[in-house]
């Protein structure tokens, strides 16, 4: 892992990155915006918008949540997830799938929203004791986090989708007595039924959450180097425009322009933006 360290910037309250986010409803057949996101200090759920490029100081939190379209009223679940993140972040409490699960279901939701489901991809940046920057990546479902290391030409996916296909890959590897390679996961162009999500957040209409388990989540920590970039996005982005088609981000790249170009790629794709899309782009100084 590479390490970020700026001897000229020992104060962690100073900006160490620039960030921008784009979100759009797309041509979703249900005419709903089921994506929501948390950006630094607040949550949002917008039909269309591009934020101003914003300086990022440590610590920081960035997250996207995608309502699962096959569940009714899922826009309320994704919103509940990012609202829970804001509450936990403001209260300086640990943010995990379990703490989010507990918060979103402490509220008694209307019965018609029972079963509404959503995914999560989240990055929390903190300062290590040695002055390096550590990013903790947590995800549930098929929202993803990508990294473009300084000088690299290809984006690297850092998350493994919770879906049937990846479970089958793990099962096959276990039967063969080996560990599945990360490159085996998140394959493209497979049968749609194999992409069924196996883990997600869900709303309950009563006290049933007390006996329900939080969704399985996967967390990993990576060190961040000056010049690295991170994208946190929903499947409305990566399903229609795979990361090998994304443009690199350079020091002179305008982050707003890059995100708008990515949105245009989604609309120009064969899928014609059939889903909501949200992407957060961060470039470390």
Image (spheres, rainbow, N blue to C red):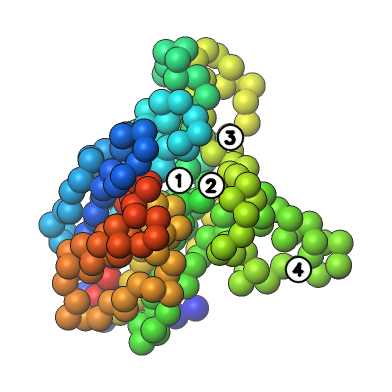
Q: Quick one: label 2, few (<14), some, or many (20+) residues within 10 Å? A: many
> Which label number is shown at residue 120?
1
Q: Earlier in the sequence, mark 1 or mark 4?
A: 1
Tell me the CA gap for discs 1 and 3.
13 Å
The reply to whether dot 2 and dot 1 touch (C-beta < 8 Å) is yes
> Which label number is shown at residue 179?
4
Task: Residue at 30% x, 62% y: name it.
Answer: 268
Tell me the CA gap for discs 2 and 4.
21 Å
Tell me the CA gap for discs 4 and 3.
26 Å
Q: Quick one: label 4, few (<14), some, or many (20+) residues within 10 Å? A: few
Viewer-proximal residue among 5 and 156: 156
| In this rendering, the label closer to the viewer, 1 or 3 | 1
| In this rendering, the label closer to the viewer, 2 or 3 | 2
Q: Which residue is mark 2?
A: 141
Q: Earlier in the sequence, mark 1 or mark 3?
A: 1
Q: Position of residue 68 (x, y in %)?
A: 47, 37
């Amino acid at each position: 892992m590479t390490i970020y360290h700026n001897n000229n910037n020992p104060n962690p309250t100073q900006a160490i990155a620039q960030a921008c986010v784009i979100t759009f409803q797309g041509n979703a057949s249900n005419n709903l915006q089921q994506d929501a996101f948390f950006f630094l200090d607040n949550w949002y759920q917008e039909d269309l918008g591009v934020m101003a490029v914003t300086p990022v100081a440590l610590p920081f939190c960035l997250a996207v949540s995608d309502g699962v379209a096959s569940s009714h009223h899922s826009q309320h679940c994704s919103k509940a997830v990012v609202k829970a993140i804001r509450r936990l972040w403001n209260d300086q409490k640990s943010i995990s799938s379990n703490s989010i699960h507990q918060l979103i279901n402490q509220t008694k939701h209307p019965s018609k929203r029972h079963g509404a489901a959503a995914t999560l991809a989240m990055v929390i940046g903190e300062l290590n004791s040695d002055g390096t920057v550590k990013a903790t990546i947590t995800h549930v479902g098929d929202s993803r986090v990508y990294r473009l290391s300084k000088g690299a030409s290809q984006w690297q996916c850092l998350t493994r989708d919770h879906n049937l296909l990846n479970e089958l890959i793990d099962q096959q590897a276990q039967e063969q007595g080996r560990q599945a390679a990360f490159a085996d996961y998140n394959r493209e162009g497979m049968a749609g039924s194999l992409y069924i999500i196996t883990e997600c957040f869900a709303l309950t209409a009563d006290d049933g959450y007390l006996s329900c388990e939080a969704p399985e989540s996967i967390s990993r920590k990576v060190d961040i180097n000056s010049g690295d970039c991170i994208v946190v996005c929903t499947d409305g982005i990566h399903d229609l425009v795979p990361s090998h088609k994304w443009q690199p981000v350079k020091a002179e790249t305008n982050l707003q322009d890059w995100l708008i170009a990515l949105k245009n790629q989604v609309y120009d794709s064969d899928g014609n933006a059939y889903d909501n899309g949200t992407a957060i782009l961060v470039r470390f100084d």
